[in-house]
Amino acid sequence: MRVVVTGATGRMGRIVREVAGERGWEVLPVSRSEGTKYEPSSLASALAEERPDALVDFTVPAASVETVATCADAGIPAVVGTTGFDDEQLDALWEASQSTPVLHAPNFARGVAALIGLVREAVAALPGYDVELTETHHRGKRDAPSGTANRLLDAVDEARGASAERVHGRQGAHLRGDREVGVHVRRAGDVRGEHEVLLAGNDEVLTLTHRAESRRVFAAGALDAAAWLAGREAGWYDFSEVLNDDA
Ligand SMILES: NC(=O)c1ccc[n+]([C@@H]2O[C@H](COP(=O)([O-])OP(=O)(O)OC[C@H]3O[C@@H](n4cnc5c(N)ncnc54)[C@H](OP(=O)(O)O)[C@@H]3O)[C@@H](O)[C@H]2O)c1
C-alpha cells in the first residue's frame, strides 16, 4: 500500500506514519512544515504524480474539506479521521464521495464501534433511566463535545426513537428534565480519549466506558479503513463496514 498522510506532523499524523511504516507501507507525508516534499498547496500534483492507493487525513475541518475535494478530482480514496465538521462541511465531504470513495469516522477504535452498539442496547433495555455522558481528552483538542460523544448521543436517540435534549454541563438552580441527556467535557493533560455513558434509575447505575490507551488504536483503525477502501467505487462508506468484513 502507498498512502498519503496529511497533517503529517500532527499528533495523529505522526503515529499514522509510524504504524503504516511498521506495516511496510510506503508513506507520502503532506505537511505545512518545511522539510517535507509535499505541502497542502501541492497536494493535487502529489496525487497526480504518486497515484497513491489512499489518503489518510487527521487535520482540521476546513483543511480536510479541501483535501477531500482534491482527492475527488484525482479519484483517490480518502479516509477522514478529522472531527468537528459543521453541516455544510459534512455536505462537502458527501459531495466529494460522489466522485471518489470517502470514509469518515469520528473514532477509529474498534472498542468504540462496539460501545456504540452496547449503548443502543442498554438504552433500549432500560427505558426511563437517566443517561449522562462524560468525555475526556488532552488539552490540545479543539472541538467539544468530541465527534465520538456526538455519535454516542445519536445512539441514545436511535434507541429511544426520539431526540434527547442535550444539556452541556449544568450550573445554577435547575431540576433535571426527563428528556435531558447531560454532556460533560473535560480537557486535560495528554488523555488520549475516554468516553463514559452512565445510565441510572431503579436504584442502580450502569456505566459503559471506553478508554483509548494510545493513539495507535486510532491509527491502526484508519489504516485498516484505507486498505479496505483502496480500489472501491466512489461512495460514502462507514467504518462499521470495514469491521463487518473483518468479522
Ligand atoms: N477519528 C479518530 O479516531 C480520531 C482520533 C484522534 C484524533 N482525531 C481527530 O483528528 C484531528 C487531528 O487531531 P490531532 O490530535 O492529530 O491534532 P494536531 O496534533 O493539532 O494535528 C493536526 C495537524 O493538522 C495540520 N493542520 C492544522 N491546521 C491546518 C490547516 N489550517 N491547514 C492544513 N493543515 C493543518 C497540522 O499538520 P502539519 O503542520 O504537518 O501540516 C497539524 O499538526 C482532530 O480533529 C481530532 O479530533 C480523530
Image (tube, grey):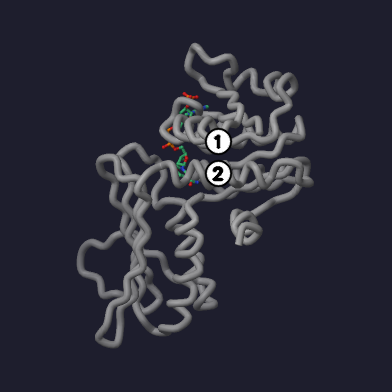
Instruction: Answer above or below: position of 246 versus 158.
Output: above
Farthest left residue in view: 172
Instruction: Answer above or below: position of 204 versus 165.
Output: below
The reply to whether the residue tagged 2 has its Cβ within 8 angstroms of ligand 1 is: yes
Badge 1 amino acid: Arg
Q: Identify residue for label 2.
A: 222
Residue 2 in view of the camera:
yes
Asked if residue 229 lies left or right of residue 145, the reply is right
Give how far across and how far down residue 102 sits, in percent.
67, 45
Which residue does the image show at 56% across and 31% down from the upper left? Answer: 63
Q: What element carries label 2?
A: helix
Which is more toward the observer, 28 or 140? 28
Badge 2 amino acid: Ala
Query: What's the mark number on residue 23?
Result: 1
Give how far across and how far down residue 51 sits, in percent.
73, 26
Which residue does the image show at 59% across and 17% down from the upper left? Answer: 38
Give how far across and how far down residue 92 sits, in percent.
66, 43
Farthest top residue in view: 35
Task: Compare marks 1 and 2 and give the one earlier in the sequence.
Answer: 1
